[in-house]
Amino acid sequence: MAFAGVLKDADITAALEACKAADSFNYKAFFAKVGLSNKSPDDIKKAFSIIDQDKSGFIEEDELKLFLQNFSKGARALTDKETKAFLQAGDTDGDGKIGIDEFAAVVKA
Ligand SMILES: [Ca+2]
């Protein structure tokens, strides 16, 4: 699992279970439940590089859409509505993608 050693399996399962239904994803609740909110900057950086699948240095919209699958392969894709809301929350400089500083801020939000 991509997040093995960083997050607890039981926390990941619980966090995914809580947003199983379409349009029920809430990034604040998810990051808190999965245990990322109180991780060290290093661990948050690790999480960022996992989610940034093409290693572009940014989390783009297509990567955000498949965000949950980094936690479990069988997880659903985010809906367009959820993806856009998540992107808007994280993308504070408005360039249409999420950088590491923006990611760290949204995880701690
Ligand atoms: Ca990327």
Image (cartoon, rainbow, N blue to C red):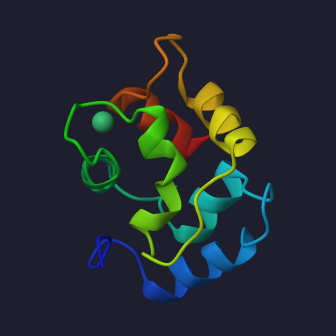
As drawn, is 91 to the left or to the right of 27?
A: left
In this rendering, the count of numbered labels is 0
Residue placed most toward the observer, 66 or 71: 66
As drawn, is 47 to the left or to the right of 26?
A: left
- Quadrant into which the N terminus falls: bottom left
Q: Position of residue 102 (x, y in %)?
A: 45, 28
Q: Residue at x 63, y 53 (%)?
A: 78
Q: Position of residue 58 (x, y in %)?
A: 32, 30
Ligand 1 quadrant in view = top left
Q: Position of residue 33 (x, y in %)?
A: 62, 69
Above or below 18: residue 13 = below
- Quadrant into which the C terminus falls: top right
Residue placed most toward the observer, 50 or 81: 81
Q: Residue at x 25, y 54 (%)?
A: 46
Furthest residue toward bottom: 10
Q: Residue at x 26, y 78 (%)?
A: 5
Q: Position of residue 39 (x, y in %)?
A: 40, 59
Above or below 23: residue 91 = above
Residue placed most toward the observer, 5 or 68: 68
As drawn, is 78 to the left or to the right of 8?
A: right
Furthest residue toward left: 55
